[in-house]
Image (cartoon, rainbow, N blue to C red):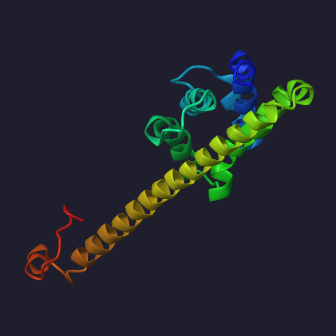
Amino acid sequence: MTDILPERKTAVLQKWFDAIISTYPRETAKFLGSRKDRFANPVGQAILEGTEGILDELLKYLRGEEKIDPGNVSAFLDNIIRIRAVQDFTPSGAVWFIFQLKQVIRQELASELEENPRMHAELARLDYGIDELALLSFDIFMKCREQIYQIKADEEKRSVYRLLQQARIITGEENEEAGGKDEKEI
């Protein structure tokens, strides 16, 4: 598998990309798959670049690296997960694209896997690496969602503060004397 998978990298990437965009509504998927321009389709480009980087790291791991280096793969995962975190995906839906890679690889290498039982040990190693990527993806997703919720909470605080100021219930001086933050610090 370590010899065959790099040869089939382009086909695997295209099938994986197609599987990922199929998780979007039909019109969105059509748009994401049709435009190859970074400026006209930044989400599609982020997915393409992210999947290629992820697969490259997975291939290094499959060739014998002890484990997947989170430092190397996190940026690629982050590019995709950050987009999915602000969209309407559940946590499992947001990271599902990692698990789709297992199916894509099995489909692409089906005949080789059937002919060569020795490849099943390499496939088990690959599955373990993909599972590691999924766990890392979930952590990234949760951090992104925490940031989103923090931004929303901070905005609500600013809104309430402005309303209290407009209602003259609180002034900037009173808030500072009470040890609070003024609007600029919130």
Residue 128 in the image: state x and y as whole percent: 67, 45
Q: Is residue 70 above or below residue 158?
A: above
Q: Residue at 12% x, 79% y: name it.
A: 179
* Observer-nearest of 59 and 155: 59
Asked whether the viewer can see residue 168, the reply is yes
Q: Say left or right for 2 vs 45.
A: right
Residue 124 as seen in the image, left or right of residue 166: right
Q: Is residue 18 above or below residue 152?
A: above
Residue at (56, 48) in percent of width and height? 137
Q: Residue 146 in the image: x percent, y percent?
A: 45, 61
| Quarter assignment of residue 165 | bottom left
In-image side of 30 versus 151 (left or right): right
Res. 90 image quadrant? bottom right
Q: How many marks?
A: 0
- Which quarter of the figure has residue 157? bottom left
**Residue 149: horizontal and vertical position, in percent?**
45, 63
Q: Residue at x 82, y 31 (%)?
A: 118
Which of the two residues, 143 or 67, is positioned nearer the viewer here?
67
Quadrant showing the N terminus = top right
Tell me if residue 120 comes above or below residue 155 in the rendering: above
Q: Is residue 30 visible?
A: no
Residue closer to the observer: 73 or 89: 73
- Tell which residue pokes out farthest to the top in this image: 7
- Which x, y percent locates residue 120? 81, 36
Q: Residue at x 51, y 24 (%)?
A: 39
Tell me the quadrant of the picture where the C terminus can be found: bottom left
